[in-house]
Image (cartoon, rainbow, N blue to C red):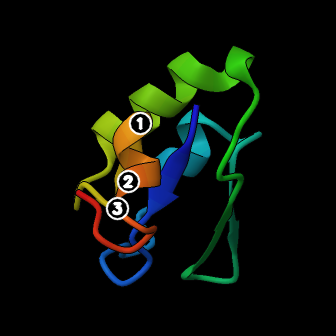
Amino acid sequence: MQIVVDLNRCQGYAQCVFLAPRVFELHGEEALLYSPAPPEEQAERVRRAAAACPVQAILVGEQAGAGGGTDVR
């Protein structure tokens, strides 16, 4: 599994951090850190986090690798 977060689109709502804390981490009020290739056991949590993102800044799966890391939904 691969993920990409459009950090220009991310608004720091941190829904992903609550749903997948082993993959997403918020530093300060708006700096999001994440693992672009999370362990497979985190896959369901990551999918839920992507679905819960209010600005749809998280792209999961094969599409994440194809967009070059910047053009995500």
- Say few, some or many: other residues with alpha carbon within 10 Å of mark 2 (under 14 / 14 to 19 / 20 or more): few
Which numbered disc, 1 or 3, marks the residue that appears first in the sequence? 1
Q: Is residue 14 visible?
A: no
Q: Is residue 32 visible?
A: yes
Q: Is residue 41 above or below residue 54?
A: above
The quadrant where residue 42 appears? top right
Tell whether 4 sits left or right of 57: right
Q: Secondary structure at mark 1?
A: helix
* Residue topped by disc 2: 66
Q: Residue 3, percent across and down?
A: 52, 47
Q: Between marks 2 and 1, how big is the CA–CA gap?
A: 7 Å
Residue at 34% from the left image edge and 44% from the top image edge: 63
Q: Residue 72, percent across and down?
A: 29, 62
Q: Is residue 48 above or below residue 20?
A: above
* Residue topped by disc 3: 67
Residue at 55% from the left image edge and 25% from the top image edge: 45
Q: Identity of the amino acid at label 3?
A: Gly
Residue at 70% from the left image edge and 19% from the top image edge: 40
Which quadrant of the rendered structure holds the N terminus? top right
* Residue topped by disc 1: 62
Q: Between marks 1 and 3, how big is the CA–CA gap?
A: 9 Å
Q: Which mark is residue 29?
A: none
Q: Identity of the amino acid at label 2?
A: Ala
Q: Identity of the amino acid at label 1?
A: Glu
Tell whether 62 sits left or right of 32: left
Q: Between marks 3 and 2, how big is the CA–CA gap?
A: 4 Å
